[in-house]
Amino acid sequence: MENRVKNKIAFITGASSGIGKACAEKLAKLGVNLILTARRKEILENLKKDLEEKYQIKVLILTFDVRNYDEVKSNIDSLPDDWKNIEILINNAGLAVGLDKFHEYKIDDVDKMIDTNVKGFIYIGNSIIPLMLKTDKVCSVINIGSVAGDIAYPGGSIYCSTKFAVKALSDSMRADLMDKKIKVTNIKPGLVETEFSVVRFRGDQDKADSVYKGIDPLYAEDVAETIVYVANLPDKIQIPELSITPLHQASGIHIFKNN
Ligand code: NDP
Ligand code: 8X3
């Protein structure tokens, strides 16, 4: 595989865990310099140290909550000029909280999901794309949607609607940018065993484990490999959408489990 990403700068949200962290590791290995963001500073600091030592790349960390527009904007505005030449954005930070019936959701959980997965997602894209428009290079915006954004499932009303929103936002973004040098991809994973379900079930590890019982799920590295494939394509090739599921998952609602 030709390495077309070496020495580029990638901006990754949700880099402290799961898919975002795995993307950081795979891109670092290919010589990409990284801006890693999340709320958990210590994890990012350890990751920076590890990746800089192992791969001789440069890593800059920013700790902010994507739900806070002022924090997002001021952190991105304060990047040193040479770090503003971002060619790859992985807009990945997101979460589910709860698996409740629509009418039983606590509004606090509704707000967490919509504020993070939709508003935070918009704040990031809205802040980074203008920087990309200033470069003369072909850039990639890689949004992390979900198969939950194709078909809604019981208990998933709010989370699924946020991922439907990621699809709509990605489609509009791609159309708005079609005369520019920016490609937009919506990556839609199925079941990936990360901290996602532990967060969804508020730290209940047994409940989280049961999501992946009876199926060999994807791991963060599997999804990251696909994301890196997209980021590393020749300039003229755009992949608008890409679904990725484990062997025994056909869609967000069709899952074969061997219990
Ligand atoms: P993880 O829980 O492992 O990682 C989520 C990441 O998002 C963490 O780094 C977390 O960092 C960050 N994050 C969450 N909330 C905020 C916030 N308010 N501000 C800043 N960062 C935040 O889950 P995944 O890696 O699985 O999830 C990544 C993306 O993939 C999400 O958008 C998710 O919806 C999507 N996805 C996941 C699937 C799965 O089955 N796991 C399937 C399909 C899509 P920190 O807590 O340090 O802030
Ligand atoms: C996360 C995976 O199972 O909620 O998008 O569809 S799932």
Image (cartoon, grey):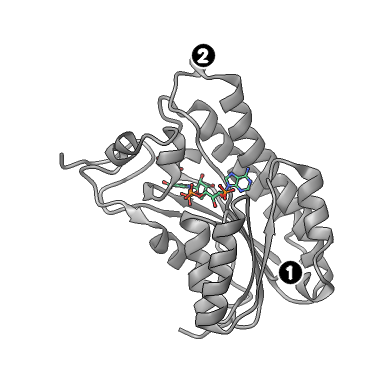
Estimate how packed mark 2 is, as few (under 14), some (14 to 19) or many (20 or more) residues with alpha carbons within 10 Å: few
Residue 209 visible to the viewer: yes
Residue 189's place in the image compared with 117, above or below, is: below
Q: Residue at x 72, y 53 (%)?
A: 125
x and y, in percent, of residue 177 in the image: 75, 58
Residue at horizontal 51%, vertical 61%?
21
Residue 41 or residue 70, whichever sits in front: 41
Q: Secondary structure at mark 1?
A: loop
Q: Residue at x 43, y 25 (%)?
A: 155
Q: Position of residue 79 (x, y in %)?
A: 80, 66
Q: Amino acid at mark 1?
A: Lys
Q: Which residue is mark 1?
A: 181
- Label 2 belongs to which residue? 103
Q: Secondary structure at mark 2?
A: helix
In this orientation, does residue 151 appear?
no
Q: Position of residue 37 (x, y in %)?
A: 64, 58
Answer left or right for 198 relative to 133.
Answer: left
The spot of residue 153 in percent (x, y) is 41, 29
**Residue ID at (37%, 47%):** 191
Q: In this rendering, is residue 72 above or below 257?
A: below
Q: Nearer the viewer, mark 2 or mark 1?
A: 2
